[in-house]
Amino acid sequence: MASSTMAESVDDFAPIEEPTSRRGGVYLVKHPLVEHHVTRMRRKQTRPSEFRDLVRRLAALMAYEATQDLPTRPYRVETPLTHADGVQVHGRIGLVPILRAGLGMVDPVLDLLPMAEVWHLGLYRDEATAQPVRYYDKLPPNRPVDVALVLDPMLATGGSATAALMTLRQWGVPQMKVLSQKEPQEGVANVAAQFPEAQIYVCQIDPELNAQKFIVPGLGDAGDRIFNTVEAHEA
Ligand code: PRP
């Protein structure tokens, strides 16, 4: 996790190091704002309009953290007075939202990564079997992106994330990152065990899944809460 300290003088700043690629594994994004927003998301009374805002804010905070090891290349620019040496992000970045709920994370992440491509994957979890069902996949057969950010506000069993990562591995994506705001221990462990090369960014880990494979205490179904379809499903 990034941290910063106040420098006494310019000489105190640490030299800038080349970012090194992070290893695969589970990364907990720990920050007071993250915890505040997750708590609001959990609230049963939180209406869809606020829920959508919370998903967006968390997505931006997570994307900031998850992109710390993006490769860069030197880039010299002309300023109004002279020249300056800077960098630009190098390589193709793909955002892979898992429909539906992942759509709620796309815009804030695209705001940070306007050069990214967006590749949608349609997966829903069968309520009877808790297995992922694929219904949309238009990934091209070749030219995989260099880095893929899988976006889904929640994992439960991890089945949907596993299906998404399997698809990306088959596509040939060298670096895979999952951004998921709420997940149980079991789901994270399942995904991490099957994809040790992937970085899995989480905001909070809940202790368990209940008999119906819902996260407890959880936050309900993120897709239904984002798209205001909770009551339609419960009717
Ligand atoms: C939810 C969630 C994940 C999946 C997690 O989607 O957004 O995609 O379930 O469950 P799993 O880890 O056990 O696979 P859902 O199936 O409700 O579809 P939706 O996004 O269309 O609501």
Image (spheres, rainbow, N blue to C red):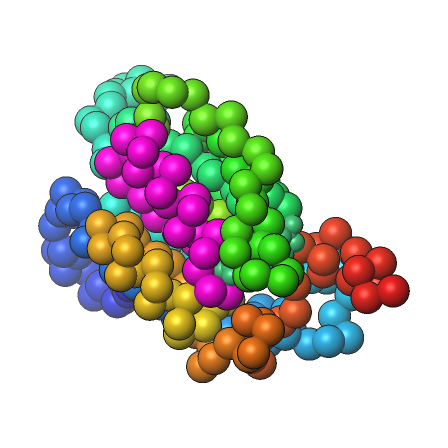
User: Where 178 falls versus 183 (above or below)?
Assistant: above
Above or below residue 112? Residue 188 is below
Total labels: the figure holds 0
| Quadrant of the picture in which ligand 1 is shown | bottom right
Q: In this orientation, does residue 73 appear?
A: yes
Which segment is the magenta one?
155-179
* Residue 98 percent across, percent down from the top left: 54, 45
Q: Is residue 132 left or right of residue 167?
A: right
Q: Is residue 89 visible?
A: no
- Using the image, determine if residue 122 lies above or below residue 178: above
Quadrant in which the N terminus appears = bottom left
Closer-to-camera residue (68/180): 180
Relative image position of residue 183 (x, y in whole percent): 47, 68
Asked if residue 31 is among those painted magenta in the image, a careful observer would answer no
Question: Which residue is at a point 39% across and 37% down the rendered structure image?
Answer: 167
Residue at 24% over, 21% down: 76
Q: Is residue 159 magenta?
A: yes
Estimate the x, y position of residue 163 in percent, counting from the top left.
43, 47
| 84 over 169 or under it: above or below | above
> From this viewpoint, which residue is outermost toward the right?
235
Identify which residue, 111 or 160, lies in the foreground.
Answer: 160
Percent of width and height locating residue 151 = 49, 48
Q: Is residue 174 left or right of residue 116?
A: left
Quadrant the C terminus occupies: bottom right
Task: Point out the residue furthest to the front here.
Answer: 129
Query: What residue lies at 41% left-to-right and 33% top-to-bottom?
Result: 94
